[in-house]
Every structure is written in C-alpha cells, then in structure tokens.
Image (spheres, rainbow, N blue to C red):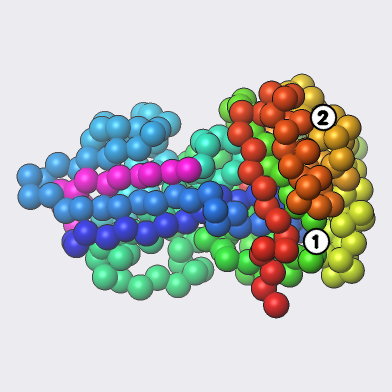
C-alpha cells in the first residue's frame, strides 16, 4: 500500500427519485462544487484508523455504528488486495451534509473505492466502481437503485434506469437550481421502506410511480427544447406525487412555498425526502439570489446554486 487520495462529489436528483427504485427512469446531476475527499496513509503499527465527521475510531470497532456499511466495504477492499491486516489511517473529508439527499454515503463509497485502488496501484473501470459502491449502499439503504453512486462518480447529468448503463444528458442553456438544506436529517432507508409498504398496502399508489417516470421523460424534453418553464412545471408536479407517496416533510413544504412565492418557477424535494434538501428552479441568476435569500429566511440551514449555463458540455 502507498499513500493515496481520491475524490467524488455530491449529487442532486432532479426528477424520478423513488420511482427509479421500481424501474422508472430518473435524471440526476453531479454537483462537483460540493466535494468529498478521502486520503489513506499506510502505518507500520498495524492499526486501522478512520477519521471522519460520522465516525472516528478503529475499523474493527465500526461494526455496529452508522459507519458499518463503509466499514464492510473497506474490509472487502482489503481482502481484494490481499491486505486484510494492513495498517492505515483513512481520512474522510466531506463538504456534503450527511443524510440530506445529496448522496453523502454514495460519495463516500466512491471516494473510498477509488482511494484503495490508487493505494494498491490498480486501475478500476466505471462499472466495477459502481459494483463496489453497491456493497455499502445495500447495507446503508437496503434497496438502492444505484443512481446515487452513478451520479456521485459522474461528470455529466445522467439519465438513469436501474440495471442499465447511465446515459449522459445536456442541460438547458439557462436556469439556476437553488439547493436548500432543511437542516432535517433525511432517512433514505425509512423513506424507501415506507414507499414499498404503501405500494403493498395500496396498489393504486403505483400510479404515482408511473407518473413520476412520465415526468422524467418530460424533463428530458424540457432539456432538449431548452424550456425551463416546462421544467419548472414538471418539478412542481413531481412534488405533488412525492407528497402523495408520503416522503415530504412540513419543513420541506415550507421551503418549497417560500421558493414559489419568491420567484421560483418550480420546486420539489430531492433524494429520499422525509427531510434533507429541496431544489428550486430560478429563471436567472438574479432570481436565484432572491430565492436563496427567501429560503434562508424560511429556515434553510445552507443553500447552493447550480447555474445550468456553467455546466454546459457542448
Ligand atoms: C435516494 O437518493 C434516491 C432514492 O430513489 C433511492 C434510490 O434510488 O436508491 C429514494
């Protein structure tokens, strides 16, 4: 093992969360300005030490903590590299708020897998990277579609369907997404389980899943036609379906209302919901500043802006 350091970044699901678990398409955006960095240094004393905001201690003691999914991933990586007892210090330095729908667990997994491969001088292709990340995502989330890991490791917006290779998309030329953190921890495992239970108890709920899939197709159309008004409408309609599925939260609704009353042309939760972040679409950078200020006044603990014009690929 040699010293190594690798990165990943946050993601924002623009449309299709939850429905993507059931085979509908979704669209997600990498947010490269919100970064995750992992660094590993070998140690001679055989200790396996982890420093992170979520967990600080030995790999062995992480088994029954919130870090257990990543700890399992690390143990399997050590076995893969025939170094199960190698000593190391692993530092996880993250700008991503944990459990806020921005892909913190997937971004950690991606950066950890990349760092171990770099430390053992072994290249890894993208499909293998996603298979590795799935190990911890399964433990943490139960039934991940794979969209979080795919987007936290991507450099282009993704059209994502479960079990298929993600396809890159080009963004509209104008429009600014404001991402606002409600400050309330989202609960991915619980939200995904709640939706599964709703669908079992009330099969008519499936209509919301189908409708969300249809809205993903509408979003692709809005991208292709550079129609941010359509995109805004689609986002607000998606929020109706997500609310009906039971994954919104009063504070998310407060933020969405504040955004809509202050110039946003659409707004919705992003990620699993039950807390976490919202996305609000503003037509211009000036409008985005007004929306950001209104969201802060309404209780958002942090806001970020994602200006489509700065993320053009062609
Ligand atoms: C979580 O970021 C997105 C969900 O659709 C779950 C998943 O796709 O794994 C809620």
Q: Tell me the quadrant of ligand 1.
A: top right
- Residue found farthest to the left: 45
Against 86, residue 252 (above or below) is above
Q: Position of residue 210 (x, y in %)?
A: 86, 50
For the residue labelled by badge 2, is the local secondary structure a helix, a strand or a loop? helix
Above or below — where is 108 with respect to 185? below
- Residue 261 within the segment the image draws in magenta: no
In the rendered view, does 74 fall on the left or right side of 193? left
Mark nearer the N terminus (1 vs 2): 1
Rendered location of residue 235, percent (x, y)? 84, 46
**What stretch of residues is rendered in magenta?**
81-95
> At 18% from the left edge and 61% from the top edge, which residue is drawn?
1
- Disc 1 from disc 2: Cα separation: 22 Å
Q: Which residue is mark 2?
A: 258
The answer, for residue 264, to whether it is visible in the render is yes
Q: Label 1 neighbourhood size at 10 Å, few (<14), some (14-19), many (20+)?
A: some
Dot label at residue 174: 1
> Where is residue 262, by image quadrant?
top right
Question: Of helix, strand and loop, which one carries label 1?
Answer: loop
Q: Is residue 294 above or below residue 236?
A: above
């Amino acid at each position: 093992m040699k010293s190594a350091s690798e990165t990943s970044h946050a993601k924002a699901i623009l449309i299709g969360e939850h429905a993507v678990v059931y085979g509908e398409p979704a669209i997600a955006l990498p947010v490269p300005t919100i970064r995750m960095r992992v660094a590993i240094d070998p140690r001679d004393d055989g200790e396996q030490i982890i420093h992170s905001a979520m967990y600080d201690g030995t790999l062995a003691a992480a088994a029954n903590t919130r870090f257990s999914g990543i700890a399992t991933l690390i143990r399997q990586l050590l076995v893969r590299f025939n170094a199960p007892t190698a000593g190391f210090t692993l530092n996880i330095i993250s700008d991503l708020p944990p459990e806020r729908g921005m892909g913190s667990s997937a971004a950690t997994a991606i950066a950890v897998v990349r760092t171990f491969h770099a430390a053992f001088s072994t290249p890894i292709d993208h499909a293998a990277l996603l298979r590795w990340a799935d190990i911890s995502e399964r433990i943490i989330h139960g039934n991940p579609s794979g969209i979080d890991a795919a987007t936290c490791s991507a450099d282009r917006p993704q059209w994502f369907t479960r079990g298929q290779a993600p396809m890159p998309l080009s963004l509209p030329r104008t429009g600014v997404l404001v991402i606002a953190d409600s400050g309330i921890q989202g609960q991915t495992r619980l939200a995904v389980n709640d939706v599964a239970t709703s669908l079992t108890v009330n099969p008519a709920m499936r209509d919301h899943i189908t409708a969300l899939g249809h809205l993903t197709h509408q979003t692709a159309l809005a991208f292709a036609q550079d129609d941010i008004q359509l995109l805004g409408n689609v986002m607000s309609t998606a929020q109706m379906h997500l609310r009906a599925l039971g994954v919104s939260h009063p504070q998310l609704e407060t933020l969405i209302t504040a955004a809509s009353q202050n110039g946003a042309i659409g707004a919705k939760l992003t990620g699993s919901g039950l807390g976490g972040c919202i996305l609000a679409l503003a037509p211009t950078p000036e409008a985005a500043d007004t929306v950001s200020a209104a969201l802060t006044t309404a209780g958002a603990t942090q806001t970020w802006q994602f200006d489509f014009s700065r993320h053009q690929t062609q």
